[in-house]
Amino acid sequence: MVVSLECGHEVTTGSSPWDKIGSANDASSLPFMEIRYRMLGKAMDEVRMKRVRLEEEKRRGHVNDSEYAASLLKIIVETNSLTKERESIAYRLKSHRSS
């Protein structure tokens, strides 16, 4: 499943090209893992800002309750996906550095 972020980035959930051993973006490559980790951090910041904007729109009355709930659910799913992938990469980075 590909989650498209508002800024144009796409985040793949589940199986990812980053997980394919032997690919150009080998998951065991320390530089690629570090880049991916930073990119996911930036994506999480963008999702946080998206939630802040949604809260502001709701407070101003520009978004009704059902639109708010649907958008908030999408943001939560996106946040969970990014968090899981970032934690996975953090674990692999820690393992890679300690070996």
Image (spheres, rainbow, N blue to C red):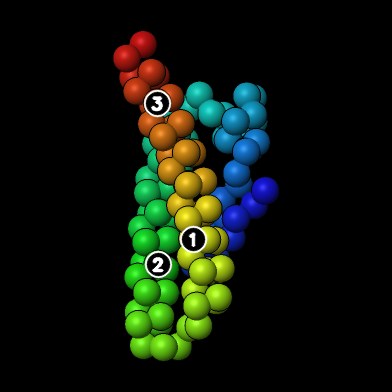
Residue that numbered label 3 is attached to: 91
Residue at 40% over, 54% down? 44
Q: Which circle marks residue 75 in the picture? A: 1
Q: Which mark's residue is nearer the viewer, 3 or 2?
A: 2
Label pair 3/2, CB-CB below 8 angstroms? no
Q: Amino acid at mark 2?
A: Arg
95 left or right of 85?
left
Pinpoint residue 27: horizontal percent, then vertical percent.
54, 29
Q: Secondary structure at mark 1?
A: helix
Residue that numbered label 2 is attached to: 51
Pointer 2 local density, CA inside 10 Å: few below 14, some 14–19, many at least 20? some
Between discs 2 and 1, the one toward the N terminus:
2
Label pair 3/1, CB-CB below 8 angstroms? no
Label pair 2/1, CB-CB below 8 angstroms? yes
State whether residue 31 appears in this view. Answer: no
Between discs 3 and 1, the one toward the N terminus:
1
Between discs 3 and 2, the one toward the N terminus:
2
Pinpoint residue 98: horizontal percent, then vertical percent.
32, 14
Pinpoint residue 65: horizontal percent, then vertical percent.
50, 78
Q: In the image as oriented, which residue stretches furthest toward the left?
A: 98
Residue at 64% over, 24% down? 22
Q: Is residue 17 above or below residue 70?
A: above
